[in-house]
Image (cartoon, helix red, strand yellow):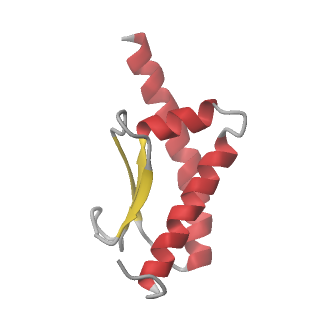
Amino acid sequence: MVLNCLERLVIATSTVVISLELTHVAESFKVLPGFGFYDDSDSPNAFALDEDVIANTKGTVIFGKQLLSDELASPWGGLAVAGLSHMNLGIFFNIKASFMTY
């Protein structure tokens, strides 16, 4: 029970920090993707989707809870999370700008 409460606190706090960072980067790239978390306990990862999962957004950046937890616990902490977020927004920007095709 305590671990669950701590996990929720970490995710809530991280969501605020990531939200501020993503807002800045999204404005720079002129994109407006949604942002969400998923259970990546078997394979930590983050990725960009060219799907509108969240209303009033264009595309989605999905961040794994395990990856988030691992990176926040690393010496790089929030800097690593910001870097991964930037990378995924950059991939999304490239997809939207047709620089990359999948």
Q: Position of residue 20 (x, y in %)?
A: 59, 55
- Most extreme residue toward the top, as rendered? 1
Q: Determine the residue located farthest toward the bottom in the rendered image.
A: 98
- Between residues 76 and 24, which one lies in front from this camera angle? 76
Quarter of the image with the N terminus in it = top left
Residue at the (48%, 28%) spot, across then down: 9
Front residue (pair 73, 29): 73
Q: Position of residue 56 (x, y in %)?
A: 32, 71
- The quadrant holding residue 74 is top right
Asked if residue 26 is positioned above or below residue 94 in the image, the reply reads above
Is residue 12 visible to us here? no
In the image, taking residue 72 as reference, residue 2 lies left or right, namely left
Give the tally of numbered discs: 0
Residue 45 place in picture, x, y as percent: 44, 47
Q: Residue at x 44, y 35 (%)?
A: 66
The reply, left or right, for residue 30 in relation to residue 55 is right
Vertical comparison of 19 with 7: above or below: below
Residue 30 appears in view: yes
Residue drawn at the location 44% of the way across and 52% of the way down: 46
Q: Residue furthest right?
A: 75
| Nearest the eye: 9 or 3 | 3
**Image height check: is 99 above or below 90?**
below
Residue 28 lies, in percent from the top left, at 62, 76
- Which quadrant would the C terminus be assigned to in this image? bottom left
